[in-house]
Amino acid sequence: MIKIINYKHGNSLKPILSRSQFSYDNINKKVKAILEDVKKNGDKALIKYNKEFDNADTKTLEVSKKEIDSAYNRIDNKFKKTLNLAYKNIEKFHRMQIRNGFITNEENGIVMGDIINPIEKVGVYIPGGTALYPSTVLMNVIPAKVAKVPEIILVSPPNKSGKINDIILAAAKISGVDKVFKIGGAQAIAALSYGTESVPKVYKIVGPGNIFVATAKRLVYGEIAIDMFAGPSEILILADENANPIHIAADMLAQAEHDKLASSVLITTSENIAVKAKEELYKQLKNLSRKEIAEESIENNGKIIITKSLDDAIFISNELAPEHLEINIKEPFSILSKIKNAGSIFLGANTPEALGDYLSGTNHVLPTSGTAKFSSPLSVDDFVKKSYYTFYTKEALHKVKDNIINFAENEKLEAHANSVRVRFEK
Amino acid sequence: MIKIINYKHGNSLKPILSRSQFSYDNINKKVKAILEDVKKNGDKALIKYNKEFDNADTKTLEVSKKEIDSAYNRIDNKFKKTLNLAYKNIEKFHRMQIRNGFITNEENGIVMGDIINPIEKVGVYIPGGTALYPSTVLMNVIPAKVAKVPEIILVSPPNKSGKINDIILAAAKISGVDKVFKIGGAQAIAALSYGTESVPKVYKIVGPGNIFVATAKRLVYGEIAIDMFAGPSEILILADENANPIHIAADMLAQAEHDKLASSVLITTSENIAVKAKEELYKQLKNLSRKEIAEESIENNGKIIITKSLDDAIFISNELAPEHLEINIKEPFSILSKIKNAGSIFLGANTPEALGDYLSGTNHVLPTSGTAKFSSPLSVDDFVKKSYYTFYTKEALHKVKDNIINFAENEKLEAHANSVRVRFEK
């Protein structure tokens, strides 16, 4: 049974903050061997691994434009419309994040600023297998597209027929991917990191994956950029006595059905809501198709916490720094400024997380495991980088000449001082 | 002797793009043991390591406000003025980077946007030893301060007298650090990552360090955030026939004196400039106090490349993605839009890199080793994080209800669909 914890201000947060984690067995050695193999043998290694790991015969690794178009034409019209609506909303939201570089020239003879350029080549990893998430394609590709990344490469493991599923290809087409390759696992990360005969080398890889993918990303990190290390998905619901326990339970279960390690936490100021939400959880659980997963998630990682005040609830929320935060209280906007650490915040009774998972427009790639304390949801910012620029006239440089020399001398870097001096000699 | 390479369009870039790298011997095991020790034994372990690694007796680890003030008072007035001028310029430039969250409510019943909050606790690592760089303090602390980080902790190893050097403390005071601790190496990274009796746990660590510091940062990365993995420092100078070879050589040597692994590259369309810059390099080298370091850097990692056209030079520059780029041509602004990958760009004859190292205001913490292809100079952005927020009315949710259910069903996530359905039942 899910625990109900009575929290009093000043109590230890330890039992509340404990979290499930993916277990990362040490498979570094295995993954390193795969990386080396692909680096050395290119496409040949990729074709071999497709056979070995995915039981797929793939003579060519790239999916042709024609195949992508056919896949798009095959998906049903209703879902096509849904995908296109999601695309429209996600694109619109992310357009708000486009930034221009700045320029400053307040002082005579001085011009400075930053320039924002897209990363030139980006890879997107999309898992295969039974859990096929076209939403993940949209969420990872659209911000890159909005950032004007000129080359977006999608990779995904082939199924036994040597193909990528239609709904993944359709989502790739809608979101504007440039090239698609049938490769998965650590070998796909290797191909994107080093490049092969057919797969272009990229400068950044985003997208979720299993432990082999995550380990490979960790190993190539530094040589190229990666997005983040995702932990189990999680939701925190803040509720007062006005919330509807049926909705709360449904939202907790939507999180729980993802993964046995997923966690659903309710913090409420109302004992009544706590008790009723608990009842509802077990009632709704009965009929779920993914009952087994959801139940284990709720039993092991679910928590219901009762606090004396809303401030205590907010305090715990900020310490937890949840991936998803639903604020299900009477005036949800009234406490928005107090929320310091959270990935995506859903306000009010009619904003279930599922809305943001699919199509309100915010990104569903979010910081997990408390990393919202220092990291951000996926955004256009993740697909651009800045360069600073500076221009000084000789007169402007002359004004600060002695200061630069003074600074360089204090750091005992004589050649630094010289580089200014030579400009005023003779 | 430094090589002069004649590049023809279409030639392999391999000999040009090869770079020196810090060698990371595998010291993971050693560093892991230090991390564990500090996690378990806190301050006691830190005091032990101060004795063991820095030969310093430190009963208390924190530097008192009084000690910091005394250090500030002891530094000479001229340098105090220089530090304060640098502070003013750096602060002013970074203020241009402050961003506000956005809000969008174009559609009836829908409010969405992002909120930007500072990271609540940040640690700054400053190396000790003989190379004392107060500029590094300013560059790492000021953007955090501008981002409104409420708690900035500076750590730096003690010298043999158990103290941190005056100029480091003075720079800490000027830039507005909240607390200073006399700890260094992997043990300092551990203290900031886990917290001890006296050292607060932080959520992000920035600042350069030796191999122990870099390895420790790599190991804690994910649990907390880190800035970047810095490689050897580097400059690329693009010059046409109008450039002054004396200035070019001086700027190359300013880079070369940092480190034997530092690299200085000149790309020029003028054979005359190539030859003269080479002569000047060896002439100026003779009298440098750090001659040995600079010479080894120039001999091993210096390059002079002659190209047929400015476009070829720009092409190579974008492939190299240099940390520092000087554009020393007649009309430097004319090619700015063609520069895709570079950390900090210095335009024209009178903008030596040393200006940006110290006090023009741009940050000197920059992406090295070609990572400018996917990462940015240190900025205010590195000290904030975003949260998304969404509010829908019941009517707005009703409009997209079927689309969410349709999407969830296509992803076989029934509880996701339920979480929307329950809101319209009864």
Image (tube, coloured by chain):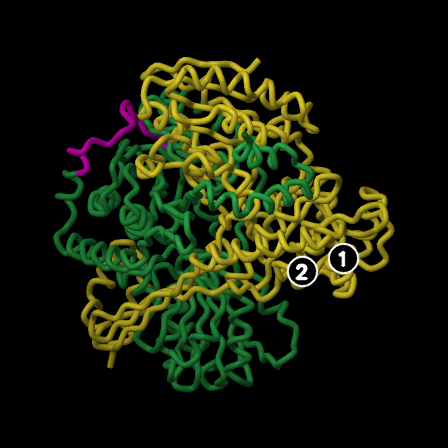
Chain colours: A green, B yellow
Q: Is residue A135 above or below residue A348?
A: above
The amino acid marked with disc number 1 is Ala
The quadrant of the rendering that contains the N terminus of chain B is top right
Pinpoint residue A8: horizontal percent, then vertical percent: 61, 81
Which quarter of the figure is the C terminus of chain B placed in?
bottom left
Q: Is residue B297 left or right of residue A68?
A: right
Q: Which residue is mark 1?
A: B71
* Image quarter of residue B212: top right
As drawn, B369 above or below A375: above
What's drawn in magenta, residue-wise? A52-68
Q: Is residue B420 left or right of residue A386?
A: left
Q: Amino acid at mark 2?
A: Lys
Q: Is residue A62 magenta?
A: yes
Query: What element does badge 1 sit on?
Result: helix
Which picture quadrant has residue B408? bottom left
Q: Which residue is mark 2?
A: B173
Q: Chain of mark 1?
A: B
User: Which residue appears at 25% of the width and 77% of the height?
Assistant: B394
- Residue A177, x across and y down, in percent: 25, 41
If you read the primary sequence from the N terminus, does the residue marked by circle 2 or circle 1 appear first? Answer: 1
Tell me if B124 is positioned left or right of A379 in this view.
right
2 and 1 marks in contact (CB < 8 Å): yes
Q: Position of residue B189 (x, y in %)?
A: 67, 49
For residue A260, say whether it is visible: no
